[in-house]
Image (cartoon, rainbow, N blue to C red):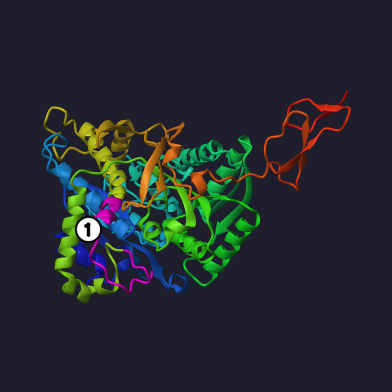
């Protein structure tokens, strides 16, 4: 029997493999990691980033997941790390053991829904009860960690919300999931995009830019961001001079052509500052085109790509100009870096065997420069491990939020938990998760009424050192930034300009250029007239 790469990983790390009669070639709902426990958690992570021949599917057969994704692997390992840490602790859930079932989403909605239906099945069966009252329904898991992509999450989140199963995402930032009428059981350990967009507008205003472009992936995540940017920019007299949607149908021959047209239009309009909301894979494709066109701009980065390994490892990435972005404010998880090093050592030790089961044609811990998985790479530099660690804290915090809620529901405060046979239900756990307030990684953590965390953003910039980036400030409703830490790559390190106008002086009026409200010339008032409001309106009054 041959194993897929992720199942080979599970085998060599000593995880329990998938129980039950699911066959090894059933890649649609592969359970990657499994560990039994008194209370079971579900985990949904993108071990792969796509499926093959999805457009030709005409029967509901298993899909083959492709493009191994080391970030998803690291996130899943972070869940396992947190669960084992909790199980070995006498301070939280004493005498109780958490278990988990972790599935590959393949960044595909059909794959995700297949796993979601299994997670809501009754007990250890594969049956879903269609009953009127779900109060005493006992699903396979008590809570779900994930998923990590808004683009595929909506149907699954609604399904789990029907059963009021707590679902805590470690990466979804789309603002719509704050709507508790539609998504009552959804929470997250990363801030909403609504706060990120506000921070971006504050950053643009801080440097005096009023002539910017906004680019985004052509999906729900990107389109929502463009809409929020346009609304907030208008309030700050910032002109979105160009909006561009980047197609999300992958690295086809069409994608670079569309991207090239977008970039050239940005350059033609003399825009020096570009806001980019897109996933890491799409951002990498865009910057490959930027480098080919030898174009330099200031790039305002969303959290989805600013510190992503695919972008940071792109050859020549430092030549695109200055990158300033927003990253979920997190902390390194003690012991996790060492854990990743041990995993990598185990993989290198079994390199020949891994090649025979599939790892020889995929990259796990190193980024495949060709993008086709053809270059095996098992060695990871220390700095890459440190960057990978950034993906752990949001998952780690999500697991601990469930554990603290269970600690309350099981009445473990006396040092001993309620009898393991005592019935608890997901809806009871959900109410406790909403109330958690605990310290994790030396930081206080809780959810607000919309299921959003109390954390903010670090403001970071790409740098020339080994890490590839450095922190220059923070944003938590108010921007705090050290301008002197930014390398603008200009003469005397002067802040680049991106303006279509300068503020008109008293005695001048605005002469608008075309339809752009923030693009105009300033002209002196005619003899015998004056302006009443000092440059804000064209309001000429006869003396």
Q: Nearer the viewer, residue 221 or 385?
A: 385
Q: Circle 1 sits on which residue?
A: 33
* Quadrant including the N terminus: bottom left
Q: Is residue 178 above or below residue 303?
A: above
Residue 443 visible somewhere in the drawing:
yes
* Quadrant including the C terminus: top right
Q: Position of residue 438 (x, y in %)?
A: 26, 31
Q: Nearer the viewer, residue 444 or 164?
A: 444
Q: Nearer the viewer, residue 435 or 516?
A: 516
Q: Position of residue 113 (x, y in %)?
A: 38, 57
Look at the numbered disc 1 and give the secondary structure of its residue. strand
Magenta: main secondary structure: loop
Q: Residue furthest top?
A: 543
Q: Residue at x 53, y 62 (%)?
A: 247
Image quadrant where residue 403 sits: top left
Q: Position of residue 527 (x, y in %)?
A: 88, 30
Q: Residue at x 86, y 33 (%)?
A: 526
Residue 164 belongs to the span the image colors magenta: no
Q: Is residue 403 above or below residue 343?
A: above
- The region drawn magenta spans 367-388
Image-based side of 282 in relation to 388, left or right = right
């Amino acid at each position: 029997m041959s194993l897929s790469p992720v199942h080979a990983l599970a085998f060599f790390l000593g995880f329990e493999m998938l129980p039950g009669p699911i066959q090894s070639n059933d890649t649609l709902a592969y359970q990657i990691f499994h560990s039994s426990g008194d209370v079971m958690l579900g985990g949904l992570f993108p071990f792969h980033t796509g499926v093959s021949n999805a457009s030709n599917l005409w029967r509901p057969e298993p899909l083959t997941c492709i493009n191994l994704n080391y970030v998803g692997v690291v996130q899943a390992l972070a869940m396992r790390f947190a669960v084992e840490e909790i199980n070995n602790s006498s301070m939280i859930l004493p005498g109780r053991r958490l278990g988990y079932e972790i599935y590959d989403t393949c960044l595909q909605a059909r794959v995700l829904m297949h796993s979601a239906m299994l997670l809501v099945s009754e007990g250890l069966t594969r049956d879903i009860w269609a009953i009127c009252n779900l109060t005493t329904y006992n699903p396979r898991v008590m809570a779900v960690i994930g998923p990590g992509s808004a683009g595929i999450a909506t149907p699954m989140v609604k399904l789990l919300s029907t059963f009021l199963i707590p679902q805590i995402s470690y990466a979804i930032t789309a603002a719509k999931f704050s709507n508790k009428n539609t998504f009552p059981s959804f929470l997250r350990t990363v801030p909403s995009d609504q706060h990120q967009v506000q921070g971006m507008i504050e950053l643009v205003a801080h440097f005096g830019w009023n002539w910017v472009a906004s680019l985004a992936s052509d999906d729900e995540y990107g389109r929502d961001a463009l809409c929020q940017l346009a609304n907030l920019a208008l309030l700050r007299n910032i002109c979105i001079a160009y909006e561009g949607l980047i197609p999300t149908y992958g690295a086809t021959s069409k994608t670079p052509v569309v991207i090239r047209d977008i970039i050239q239009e940005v350059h033609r309009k003399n825009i020096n500052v570009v806001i980019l909301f897109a996933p890491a894979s799409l951002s990498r494709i865009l910057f490959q085109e930027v480098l080919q066109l030898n174009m330099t701009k200031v790039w305002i980065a969303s959290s989805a790509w600013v510190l992503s390994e695919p972008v940071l490892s792109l050859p020549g990435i430092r030549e695109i100009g200055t990158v300033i972005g927003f990253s979920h404010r997190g902390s390194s998880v003690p012991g996790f870096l060492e854990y990743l090093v041990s995993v990598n050592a185990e993989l290198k030790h079994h390199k020949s065997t891994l090649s025979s089961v599939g790892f020889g044609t995929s990259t796990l811990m190193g980024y495949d420069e060709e993008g086709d998985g053809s270059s095996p790479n098992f060695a990871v530099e220390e700095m890459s491990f440190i960057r990978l660690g950034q993906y752990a804290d949001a998952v780690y915090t999500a697991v601990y939020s469930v554990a603290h809620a269970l600690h309350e529901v099981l009445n473990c405060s006396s040092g001993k938990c309620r009898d393991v046979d005592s019935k608890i239900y997901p809806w009871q756990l959900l109410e406790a998760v909403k109330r958690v307030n605990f310290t994790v990684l030396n930081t206080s953590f809780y959810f607000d009424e919309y299921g959003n965390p109390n954390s903010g953003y670090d403001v970071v910039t790409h740098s020339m050192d080994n890490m590839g980036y450095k922190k220059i400030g923070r944003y938590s409703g108010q921007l705090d930034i050290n301008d002197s830490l930014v390398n603008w790559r200009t003469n005397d390190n002067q802040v680049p300009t991106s303006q279509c106008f300068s503020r008109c002086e008293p005695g001048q009026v605005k002469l608008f250029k075309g339809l752009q409200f923030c693009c105009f010339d300033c002209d002196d008032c005619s003899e015998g007239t004056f302006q009443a409001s000092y440059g804000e309106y064209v309001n000429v009054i006869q003396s």
